[in-house]
Image (spheres, rainbow, N blue to C red):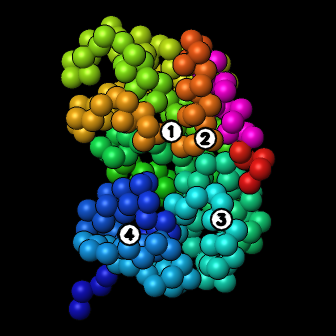
Amino acid sequence: MKINLLKKIGIIGFGNMGSVIAQRLSAQKDEYEVFVFDKEKSKLANLAGIKAAKDARDLAAQVEIIILAIKPQDFNHILKDIKGSTGNRLIISIAAGISTGRIEKLLGQARVIRVMPNIGAKVAESVTCLCKGALATDDDLELAQELFYYLGAVRIIDEPMMNAATAISGSGPAYVFYFIENSTLDPENIPEHARHDMMRRLEKAAQGLGFSTEDAAFLAANTTNAAISLLHKTKLPAQELRKQVTSKGGTTEAALEILTRGGSWEEAAQAALKRAQDLARRL
């Protein structure tokens, strides 16, 4: 008799990032069995290699790891719904501005990993920052790393720096797209000096938000390269990709307001961080 040793992963939320995570993990057929749920049932039509759960509670009951890929405003409702079904399951949240402490409070005794991926996940070149909550173990953190390596580069940081990561690796691709959009550069053939110039600008911005020299260099290089890879692989205009990263009222919009007024990348990142902190306080 064949024993099923596949790790069961449940993803609540099948939007842009939730669907990418589901597709990357379900492609590892010898490792993971992927279940998804989204309140918009139409998103779950014609799934291939992915199982749809009838609701969030049903999903939670079937899996070992729950990935929360939902909007911050949906958190209270979803977590209240699954609270009695989470047991000792590992909870991984990709929602911006939601602390591990808040999730622990909403679910009770929960092992929580907080994750911030970016748009590079679409071409398996995400820059993903991770941190663990009070009850999560080193093994939990290692498992989360393994999952997100399928989306690209991974960096472990302290939770107080997660909002800064949102401003750098989360919003950073938009700085690159805006720069290219408003230059004479050929998106299909960006010279190395221009690539390095953008890396230096983003690295300086990251250091200005408190990242160490090593972390700033890692985030800047990988974020810049991911943005350029998106241009090459999707063949979409820089303007269109910039719009994809920019949510109304979000951190990227705050940064771009600074850039359009002639501000520096450092000033843009500071504005993005302030917006991230403001949003976190409101949630």
Residue 275 lies in the magenta-colored region: yes
Is the Cβ of the residue at disc 2 closer than 8 Å to that at disc 1? yes
Residue at x 41% of width, y 54% of height: 16
Determine the main secondary structure of the stretch shown in magenta. Answer: helix
Q: Give the percent coordinates (x, y) of residue 137.
A: 61, 58
Q: Give the percent coordinates (x, y) of residue 101.
A: 74, 57
Q: Give the percent coordinates (x, y) of residue 217.
A: 49, 21
- Residue nearest the observer in this picture, 149 or 188: 188
Report crowding for label 4: few under 14, some 14 to 19, many 20 or more residues within 10 A (C-alpha). some
Tell me: residue 169, above or below residue 16: above
Label 2 sits on residue: 250
Which numbered disc flags the more N-terminal residue, 2 or 3?
Answer: 3
In which quadrant will I find the C terminus? bottom right
Tell me: residue 55, above or below residue 135: below
Label 1 sits on residue: 246
SS assignment at label 4: helix
Q: Give the percent coordinates (x, y) of residue 46.
A: 26, 74
Label 4 sits on residue: 43
